[in-house]
Amino acid sequence: TSKLHGKTALVTGASKGIGAGIAKELAAAGASVAVNYARAREDADAVVASIKDAGGRAIAVQCDVSKSADVARMLTPSG
């Protein structure tokens, strides 16, 4: 088993660049990853697809982290 199996990681700004790389590495280490994006849904979906194609677990989560209401919504379990 990998060291992050059973853990969940939230990576902000994960639709591009360094954030996308971090999300992919965390997934490769076994974490389920929430790929946060503010506006670039297509890029976030591509990161999620890349993680899933490699056998990992990921979802895309929209949130502008500069807005406290968005952050509260992102961190509040739904259902």
Image: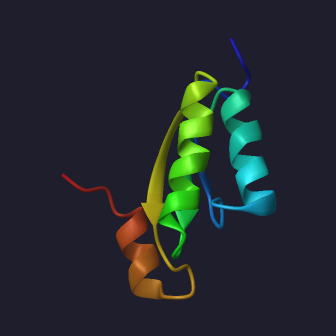
Label total for image: 0
Between residue 35 and residue 53, name the one nearer to us.
53
- Residue visible at 62% across and 37% down? 50
Q: Report the residue that reaches farthest toward the bottom.
A: 67
- Residue visible at 62% across and 24% down? 5
As drawn, is 45 to the left or to the right of 20?
left
Between residue 4 and residue 37, name the one nearer to us.
37
Q: Is residue 28 above or below residue 1?
A: below
Q: Position of residue 1 (x, y in %)?
A: 68, 11
Q: Is residue 2 above or below residue 31?
A: above
Q: Report the residue that reaches farthest toward the top.
A: 1
As drawn, is 74 to the left or to the right of 58?
left
As drawn, is 73 to the left or to the right of 35?
left
Q: Position of residue 17 (x, y in %)?
A: 78, 61
Residue 13: which quarter of the image? Answer: bottom right
Query: Is any part of residue 7 visible from this angle?
Result: no
Q: Position of residue 35 (x, y in %)?
A: 56, 54
- Residue visible at 61% across and 47% down? 47
Residue 11: which quarter of the image? Answer: bottom right
- Residue visible at 51% across and 76% down? 39
Q: Position of residue 44 (x, y in %)?
A: 55, 57
Q: Colour scheme used in the picture?
A: rainbow
Between residue 34 and residue 16, name the one nearer to us.
16
Q: Report the residue that reaches farthest toward the left.
A: 79
Query: Is any part of residue 5 visible from this angle?
Result: yes
